[in-house]
Image: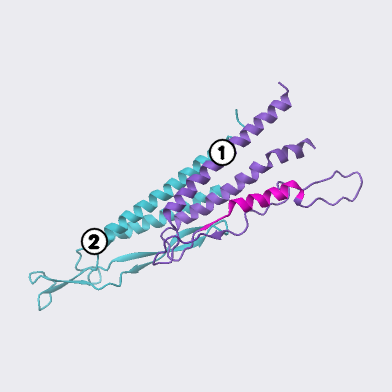
Chain colours: A purple, B cyan
């Protein structure tokens, strides 16, 4: 049971990190394709993706079937259900169209890339803090 | 691990941009080559980029789809002393537009730099991830 609690304690940041890494990959692809004709820039809606992940974590997910009374209650959290990820990425709205049909705006992408990297590191820091807190509790000193 | 895929994506873009820089170098070097192996003046080359699927279904890399010959007309210069001049004294010169090529060069080098930055950011994120829970 303690493991399950540890899982839920770290679960939110785990999902956040996974989504941030995914988003970083998408933005990198946008930057890579800045000169590809007809390429459409894509991004995920982080807010709705993380909400979806948290709903799974707070009991909105599935629970495991029990065939005996001696089985423990297995509550599915975002960590042990296969959280499918951020869903289908959305196309970015066009700010300034270009003749070759490419919709990558380098300023927007660099901005999003830097922002996402900082938030990724913020999640890492908070996860580290939580791990330290947990260690203090375990060691009792 | 999607952050590792950033290396593949940015790497594909870097090699595509460096190939573009290569054609720019070739075009600029041959801006005055009035003849070539096939006896005709040099034709400017341009690369065509295309998005290719990577390890992840949503994020795509880049590759040079094909290298085309610039369809713009050749420059005709009046130079009666040139050994390749026709009977009226005109020489057909390559269709390289030096100004366009310089712009192309700057664009390719900036795009390359962007991808290097992307790769560096992903690298530092991965290194920080490795140190979760340490000290």
Q: Position of residue A44 (x, y in %)?
A: 57, 55
Q: Position of residue A11 (x, y in %)?
A: 68, 42
Q: Quadrant of residue B43?
A: bottom left
In this view, B128 is above or below B114: above
The residue that appears at 67% across and 29% down in the rendered structure is A133
Q: Is residue B73 left or right of residue A61?
A: left
User: Which tag is nearer the camera, tag 2 or tag 1?
Assistant: 1
- In the displayed image of the protein, which residue is found farthest to the right? A69
Q: Is residue B34 left or right of residue A102?
A: left
> Would residue A77 be seen by someone viewing this image from the given angle?
no
Q: Position of residue A33 (x, y in %)?
A: 45, 58
Q: Chain of mark 2?
A: B
In this figure, which residue is indicated by the disc labeled 2?
B98
Query: Is residue B20 rendered magenta in the image?
Result: no
The range drawn in magenta is A42-59
Give the numbered dot on residue B3.
none
In this figure, which residue is indicated by the disc labeled 1?
A122
The residue that appears at 46% across and 46% down in the rendered structure is B119
Query: Is residue A54 rendered magenta in the image?
Result: yes
Quadrant of image for the C terminus of chain A: top right
Of B42 and A117, which appears nearest the observer? A117
Q: Position of residue A10 (x, y in %)?
A: 68, 39
Quadrant of image for the N terminus of chain A: top right
- In the displayed image of the protein, which residue is found farthest to the top? A141
The residue that appears at 67% across and 54% down in the rendered structure is A84
Q: CA distance from mark 2 to mark 1?
A: 48 Å
In this view, A75 is above or below A39: above
Crowding around mark 2 (Cα neighbors within 10 Å: few <14, some 14 to 19, many 20+) is some
Q: Chain of mark 1?
A: A
């Amino acid at each position: 049971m303690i493991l399950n609690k540890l899982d839920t304690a770290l679960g939110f940041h785990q999902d956040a990190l996974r989504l941030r890494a995914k988003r970083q990959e998408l933005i990198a692809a946008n930057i890579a394709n800045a000169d590809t004709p007809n390429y459409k820039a894509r991004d995920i809606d982080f807010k709705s993706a993380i909400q979806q992940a948290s709903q799974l974590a707070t009991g909105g997910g599935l629970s495991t079937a029990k065939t005996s009374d001696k089985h423990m209650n297995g509550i599915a959290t975002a960590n042990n259900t296969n959280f499918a990820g951020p869903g289908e990425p959305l196309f970015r709205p066009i700010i300034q169209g270009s003749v070759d049909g490419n919709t990558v705006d380098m300023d927007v992408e660099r901005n999003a890339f830097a922002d996402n990297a900082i938030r990724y590191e913020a999640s890492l820091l908070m996860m580290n803090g939580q791990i330290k807190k947990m260690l203090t509790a375990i060691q009792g000193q | 691990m999607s952050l590792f895929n950033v290396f593949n994506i940015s790497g594909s873009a870097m090699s595509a941009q460096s190939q573009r820089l290569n054609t720019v170098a070739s075009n600029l070097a041959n801006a005055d080559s009035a003849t070539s192996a096939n006896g005709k003046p040099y034709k400017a080359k341009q690369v065509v980029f295309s998005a290719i699927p990577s390890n992840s279904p949503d994020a795509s890399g880049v590759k040079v789809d094909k290298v085309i010959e610039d369809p713009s007309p050749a420059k005709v210069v009046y130079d009666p002393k040139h050994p390749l001049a026709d009977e009226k004294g005109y020489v057909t010169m390559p269709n390289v537009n030096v100004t366009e090529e310089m712009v192309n060069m700057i664009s390719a080098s900036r795009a390359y730099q962007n991808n290097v930055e992307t790769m560096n950011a992903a690298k530092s994120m991965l290194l920080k991830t490795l140190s979760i829970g340490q000290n």
